[in-house]
Amino acid sequence: MGDLIDLRSDTVTRPTAGMRRAMADAEVGDDVYGEDPLVNALEERVAGMFGHEAALFVPSGTMGNQIGMRLVCEPGQEVLCDADAHVVTYEMGAAAAIFGISTRTVVSQGGRLDADQLIAQVRPKTDWHLTATAAIAVENSHNRGGGLVQPLDQLQKLWDWSRANDVAVHLDGARIWNAHAASGVPLDTYGRLADTASVCFSKGLGTPVGSVLVGSAARIATGRLWRKRLGGGMRQVGVLAAACHYALDHHLPRLGEDHEHAQLLAKRLGVDPSSVETNMVVLDDVAAPVIAEAAKAQGVLVSQVSARRIRLVLHLDVDDAAVDRAADVLAPLLDR
Ligand SMILES: Cc1ncc(COP(=O)(O)O)c(C=O)c1O
């Protein structure tokens, strides 16, 4: 595996030497008893960063999203989101399978949030003929949208409308760090435009595992029950929280490098750099399986999103030299 350049996802990173040391040195306690000092500190830290009262450390972004949505939506009600949202595409129907939550989708322009389009689809809680829309889920940055950053004015518009109309907003912020690094919008600005938000440490920030769900104190207290019910109560997980603290200190400030690498790669591959907003490069209208096989044979792994689309994701384990080599391998295969 040593020489492989893995551009399939930013989840493939391995903990750095510094992160491993922080994990090894972690003071720990039993987190189900609320006694793990680094988990408690992480929850407080992340809640503060996003302008929320409380937070809950969970094993995965999927658990963060699903508990987050359950906290703002009752069984038999619906969550509305775009058709390419991670919460309805890649989370195994969890909202329905586990919580009895219905989901309804609108087809967006490549994942970009259009507040009016979503608002037009909301079904009121006051009409007993209709499945009530309790919440709207938003993803930022947008995975299937190629890492696009949601426009702040649309987030604000949706939020303002939601306050007046008794509809909650859940943010899938698995890569909110990338959105923040690219747009300069403060994390707490994004956080304050959502009732619940799930943020991940195991993507661009490079930890082996871990996500944090933020919300009001009351909601997070209920979320803690759901986490336990789902088997997500963890014990001496200060070793993981230590990795998250390390990532906030050392990896959050460097995310811009991944974005620069994405720009470089895009230019080398003839992709319009303006289509690259964060750490992903999308190759459209290509023979995805053929290219993926040929690239793999030369030590470059890519992700096939569909038969005609490839996704390349830049991350902590891809340095300048790797970007160069990936471009050398991929450019001739693209026939551009
Ligand atoms: C946008 C988005 N949300 C949520 C998740 C789920 O995270 P996890 O794999 O930790 O469950 C992912 C995973 O890649 C993601 O890309």
Image: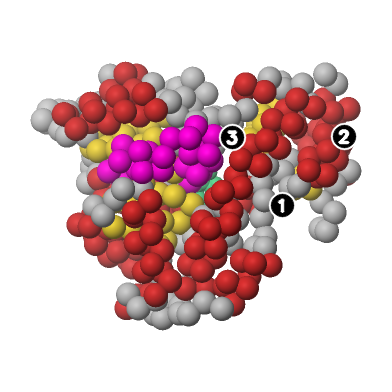
Using the image as rendered, state which of residue 160 and residue 329 is in the foreground: 160
Q: Horizontal and vertical percent for residue 156? A: 31, 28
Q: Which mark is residue 278?
A: 3
Q: Residue 40's x, y, as percent? A: 36, 69
Label 2: few (<14), some (14–19) or many (≥20) C-alpha neighbours in 10 Å: some
> What mark, if any, has residue 328 been given in the picture?
2
Q: Is residue 141 magenta?
A: no
Mark 2, secondary structure of its residue? helix
Does label 1 point to a residue whose CB lies under 8 Å from ligand 1? Answer: no
Tell me the distance, in whole angstroms, between the alpha carbons under discs 3 and 1.
Answer: 16 Å
Q: Residue 299, relative to residue 31: is it above or below? A: above
Q: Nearer the viewer, residue 89 or 311?
A: 311
Count residues near mark 1 (Cα–Cα under 10 Å), then give few for <14, some for 14-19, many for 20+.
some
Q: How far apart are the two marked residues, 1 and 2, measured between alpha carbons?
A: 18 Å
**Badge number at residue 317:** 1
- Which portion, as a residue range, is magenta? 174-196
Asked whether, in this view, residue 58 is left or right of residue 266, the answer is left
The amino acid marked with disc number 3 is Thr
Q: Is residue 39 above or below residue 215?
A: below
Q: Earlier in the sequence, mark 3 or mark 2?
A: 3
